[in-house]
Image (tube, helix red, strand yellow):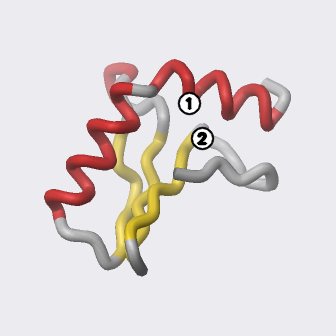
Amino acid sequence: MRIWSNDHLPRHVHVFKGDGECVINLVGAGGLPELREFYNLKRKEVAKAIRIVADNQQTLIEAWNQIHGA
């Protein structure tokens, strides 16, 4: 899971597995993480990534804010 220092809003993370990737917004509709896009991942892998991000949402938001000075 990565937060790039030169990335853009909205706050999001990149999740990688093998040659696959998904991008998950940290705060989507209703305040929950929201899938933005994915490549070369099975839906089951994407669902797992979303669960992991949801379980760690506050920590990831704090990390984004620290990296991007928000």
Disc 2 vs disc 1: which is toward the camera? Answer: 1
* Residue pictured at 31% horizontal, 78% vertical: 40
10 Å crowding of disc 2: few (<14), some (14-19), many (20+):
few
Q: Is residue 39 left or right of residue 16?
A: left
Decide: marks 2, 1 in contact (CB < 8 A)?
A: no
Q: Mark 1 = which residue?
A: 60
Marks 2 and 1, the one that precedes in the sequence: 2
Q: Is residue 47 left or right of residue 19?
A: left
* Residue pictured at 24% horizontal, 47% vertical: 48
Answer above or below: position of 19 versus 6: below
10 Å crowding of disc 1: few (<14), some (14-19), many (20+):
many
Answer above or below: position of 23 versus 66: below
- Mark 2 is on which residue type? Pro
Answer above or below: position of 37 versus 19: above
Q: Mark 2 = which residue?
A: 10
Label 1, secondary structure: give it: helix
- Mark 1 is on which residue type? Leu
Marks 2 and 1, how far apart at CA: 13 Å
Label 2, secondary structure: give it: loop
